[in-house]
C-alpha cells in the first residue's frame, strides 16, 4: 500500500488552500463557502479598516484571499464588537475573501483574540516567573476576589467578573518584567502593583475612572526629561511597525 496519497487524488486542488482537502481523507461535507459581502452587513468603518490593513500586505491580489492580514483584521473585529463574534468573523471573511473557518482557526490560536464575550474591560495578571516571584499569584487572587471572578477559570483562560463587566485572566510574561508584579488593563501596563491595588482598579473600571495613574507605564516620566517628545505610537492604536 502506498504510503503517500498520489497528488491527483487530493480533492480541491483548484480551491483556495483552506477549502482544499489535502489530508487524503473523505470529506465530511461540502467545503465551507466564502461569504458574499452583500450577505454579511459589514459596517462601513470595519470594512474600510480591514481593506486598509490588507493593503499593507503583498498578497492583496492572491486567489487564496488576503490571509496575511488575518491577525490585524481579527483585532479590528474584536475592537468593533468587544470579541471575535461569529458574525464579525463572517464580515471579515467576506472582506478578505477567505472562509470564516480559516479566520476562526487563526483566532483560536492566539490568547489575545477572544472567541467568547469578555466584558467591557480586560485585566491580564502576569503570573510568569518575575511577577510570580514578586506576588503575581496573590495579585491574581486579589483581582478575582475584588471582581467576583472565578479563580480557577481565571488561571486557565480567563473568567468574567460577577457582573460580567470585567474579564480577569492569569497570563504568561507580558514583556514588562521590570514592572513586576504587573497587569495589563485594557492593553495598558501598570506596575509594580500590590494586592490592595486590585480593588482600586476594579472600582475605577466600574466607575469609568482613570486607572491607577501613578502606576501606569504610559504616564511614567520619559527618560531624558520632559523636553523629549512623546512617542505617538504609545497613544495610537497602531503597532510599532505600522
Ligand atoms: S514575568 Fe511578568 S512581565 Fe515578565
Image (tube, grey):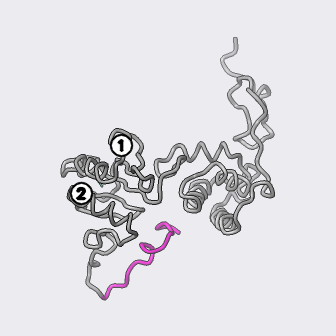
Q: Nearer the viewer, mark 2 or mark 1?
A: 1
Q: For mark 2, what is the residue?
A: 180
| Residue 83 x %, y % | 54, 54
Q: Is 90 placed left or right of 134 in the picture? A: right
- Quick one: which residue is furthest to the front in this view? 163
Q: Tell me which residue sits at (64%, 61%) in the image.
A: 57
Q: Is residue 58 a member of the stretch shown in magenta?
A: no
Pointer 1 local density, CA inside 10 Å: few below 14, some 14–19, many at least 20 = some
| Residue 77 x %, y % | 60, 58
Q: Is 116 placed left or right of 137 in the picture? A: right
Give the camera-side residue of 181 and 4.
181
| Residue 240 x %, y % | 46, 67
Q: Tell me which residue sits at (59%, 42%) in the image.
A: 105
Circles 2 and 1, Cβ within 8 Å, touching? The answer is no
Q: Is 169 placed left or right of 178 in the picture? A: right
Which quadrant of the figure has residue 156?
top left
Look at the magenta stretch and give its main secondary structure.
loop
Give the camera-side residue of 34 and 222.
34
Q: Tell me which residue sits at (73%, 39%) in the image.
A: 19
Q: CA distance from mark 2 to mark 1?
A: 23 Å
Mark earlier in primary sequence (2, 1): 1
Give the camera-side residue of 231 and 198.
198
Q: Which residues are magenta?
A: 227-242
Label 1 near ligand 1 (CB < 8 Å): no
Task: Answer above or below: position of 112 versus 6.
Answer: below
Q: For mark 1, what is the residue?
A: 150
Label 2 near ligand 1 (CB < 8 Å): yes
Give the camera-side residue of 235 and 207.
207
Q: Tell me which residue sits at (24%, 56%) in the image.
A: 181
| Label 1 SS | loop
| Residue 232 x %, y % | 44, 78
Amino acid at each position: 500500500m502506498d504510503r503517500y496519497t498520489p497528488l491527483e487524488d487530493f480533492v480541491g486542488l483548484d480551491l483556495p488552500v483552506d477549502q482544499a482537502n489535502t489530508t487524503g481523507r473523505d470529506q465530511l461535507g461540502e467545503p465551507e463557502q466564502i461569504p458574499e459581502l452583500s450577505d454579511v452587513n459589514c459596517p462601513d468603518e470595519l470594512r474600510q479598516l480591514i481593506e486598509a490593513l490588507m493593503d499593507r500586505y503583498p498578497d492583496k491580489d492572491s486567489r487564496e484571499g488576503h490571509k496575511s492580514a488575518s491577525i490585524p483584521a481579527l483585532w479590528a473585529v474584536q475592537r468593533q464588537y468587544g470579541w471575535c463574534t461569529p458574525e464579525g468573523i463572517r464580515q471579515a471573511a467576506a472582506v478578505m475573501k477567505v472562509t470564516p473557518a480559516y479566520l476562526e482557526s487563526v483566532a483560536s490560536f492566539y490568547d489575545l483574540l477572544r472567541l467568547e464575550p469578555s466584558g467591557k474591560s480586560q485585566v491580564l495578571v502576569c503570573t510568569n516567573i518575575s511577577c510570580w516571584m514578586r506576588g503575581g499569584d496573590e495579585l491574581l487572587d486579589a483581582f478575582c476576589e475584588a471582581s467576583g471572578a472565578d479563580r480557577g477559570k481565571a488561571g486557565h483562560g480567563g473568567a468574567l467578573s460577577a457582573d460580567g463587566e470585567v474579564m480577569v485572566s492569569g497570563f504568561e510574561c507580558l514583556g514588562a518584567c521590570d514592572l513586576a508584579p504587573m497587569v495589563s488593563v485594557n492593553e495598558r501596563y501598570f506596575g509594580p502593583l500590590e494586592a490592595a491595588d486590585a480593588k482600586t482598579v476594579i472600582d475605577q473600571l466600574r466607575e469609568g475612572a482613570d486607572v491607577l495613574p501613578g502606576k501606569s507605564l504610559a504616564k511614567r516620566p520619559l527618560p531624558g526629561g520632559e523636553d523629549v517628545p512623546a512617542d505617538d505610537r504609545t497613544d495610537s492604536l497602531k503597532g510599532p511597525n505600522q
